[in-house]
Image: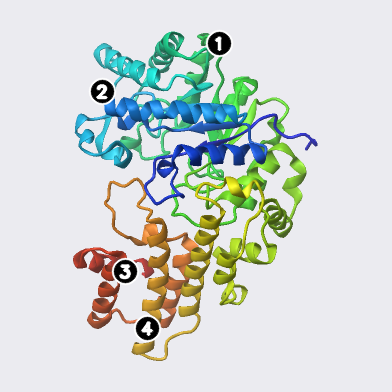
Amino acid sequence: MGAKGFDHAGFYLHASWVFNYPLAVRTWAPADYDAMFRLLGGIGIDRVMIWPMSEITPPPLAESDAEYLRGFRGIVAAAQQRGLECWLTFCPNLSTRGEIRATPVKERVFYPFMRTFRLDDERQFGEYTSHMRNLLACMNNADGYVFIDGDPGGYPGADPRDYFRMLGAVRGILDEVAAEKRPKLIPWIWCGWGADWEGEGAWKPDLRRLVRPFLEYLKQNVPEEPWELLPGRSIRDGWGNGRINFELVEEAGLVARSTLMTYEIIEFEPTPPAFVIQFDDIRRVVGEEMRYAGTAKGIFGNAQQPVSALHNLIYFARCAKDPSWLEKPDDEVLHAIARLLGGDASVLVPAWKSATAGLDDLPADLSGRIRDSRLTSELAACIPGGPEMYLGLLADFVRARRAVLEHTAVLPRDGREATDRLRGAVAGIIGWWLRHRYVFSGESGPHFDWGYAHHASFIAPLHIWIRDGRVAPDDALRNILAEDIAALAGMPREVAEQRVDGLFSGVR
């Protein structure tokens, strides 16, 4: 491994999932984006990619939707003014049906209204590219325009010729509408153009069968300059796409054209907001891909909730530019991040480690100490929502974690104690959910569910305790829990009863 890292390091702001400010990027105001851009520059990130979710603005483009999209011009300009190269990303053949307009644009949920355009059909190709012209006219000042090959997007059996024909149409549109400079076009090689996820299942299609002809077509029909590639890999082999796309891009001799997207190593997707350390994933994946540092254009990471993943983001940025950081132990890294933020390491380090800590490592006063502490650096002032809100979120997370551990610390002596302890643990879990209100992509409604509540490390102690304590889910206990959940989470009683059933079936 050489001493030099990647020339460029980037970060993808994914704005799809639904939860509270400031955790969800889609809730940010322009000032929050600008703060994030200053933060990224301060840690050595020089590229940023944003999904504006233009897909939620269906054709024909309404003026109110166009006004919403034009707001991204200012966001892109802010990134550029802070020294970042700014890319916008799109699905290559998707929009939504017109009935989505009944919901205000910032509250729209994409997937239930998704509409697919087949690019091998002349009418649909024309309708899609005409709509894309209107979208790009609203967002015409980015440095790069990225089109993912699917997830979401594509359709079974889609031909590479149709993707690159679409890309050529986009180049022609941008030549007419782009502000000043000629931007890059960037195919995002991810799940294989033409994959059949409905018929074969997610990640079941043979990526080599799909990606190889895509890359061969590209090499034989080279796009107009400027262009590059964004091949993506998952967090580990045997999951998602593994690192197959990197292997295929190397096989095709296109590494020098590529920025490497290392997905999920900063924050696993999808996951409820949580302060979780993923340094081992960052070390392993960035270490594996450091072989390309002298050849590839750069490396990218991503997060849906960059505020709670801030410590992982900082570590990723350090490793990407300086491989010596890959060898630093967790505690050394955490203390360095605490200094960078101008915070008290004796408070921050145990708080950041709380997701996997035992009860003895979480003092009863830690949450209060976090809330009373300060982050004093200029970098900390750039956290979206501000440093005080960041500390408040961290304090609430620690409080919830301790509540679960405290109430599951011993097995119950009798039914009454079992009920009291179970209620206390459930209240802690729901308390953190009330702070973030994560509901994945939103189409299942706004109500609490166990899968939305916490990182798995929170739920596991409760499941183990219920199983080992042989807590009997009789009618009396079920009624008490249903009442608690309905009251705490603000949901109908019948939905709360389903959550009680879900808790005990999850244990089994």
> Which residue is situated farthest in the bottom direction here?
413
Above or below — where is 125 with respect to 426?
Answer: above
Comparing marks 2 and 4, which lies closer to the viewer? 2
Marks 1 and 4 sit apart, C-alpha to C-alpha, by 66 Å
Q: In the image, which disc is placed on residue 94?
A: none
User: Quadrant of the image for the N terminus?
Assistant: top right
Q: Nearer the viewer, residue 499 or 347?
A: 347
Q: Amino acid at mark 4?
A: Asp
Marks 1 and 3 sit apart, C-alpha to C-alpha, by 56 Å
Check whether the beta carbons of the residues at disc 1 and disc 3 lie within 8 A of each other. no
Marks 1 and 2 sit apart, C-alpha to C-alpha, by 29 Å
Q: Amino acid at mark 3?
A: Leu
Comparing marks 1 and 2, which lies closer to the viewer? 2
Marks 3 and 4 sit apart, C-alpha to C-alpha, by 15 Å
Q: Position of residue 18 (x, y in %)?
A: 37, 47
Q: Does label 1 or label 2 sit earlier along the sequence?
A: 2
Helix, strand or loop under label 2: loop
| Crowd class of label 1 (few under 14; some 14 to 19; many from 20; radius 10 Å) | few
Q: Does label 3 or label 4 sit earlier along the sequence?
A: 4
Picture quadrant of residue 135: top left
Q: In the image, which disc is placed on residue 420?
A: 4
Q: Nearer the viewer, residue 374 or 278?
A: 374
Q: Amino acid at mark 2?
A: Pro
Above or below — where is 200 with respect to 428?
Answer: above
Q: Nearer the viewer, residue 289 or 337?
A: 337
Above or below — where is 455 with respect to 469?
Answer: above
Q: In the image, which disc is placed on residue 59?
A: 2
Q: Position of residue 93 (x, y in %)?
A: 34, 24
Instruction: Name the residue: 56% across, 54% down.
Output: 387
Q: Does label 2 or label 3 sit earlier along the sequence?
A: 2
Q: Which residue is mark 3?
A: 488
Q: Which residue is mark 1?
A: 225
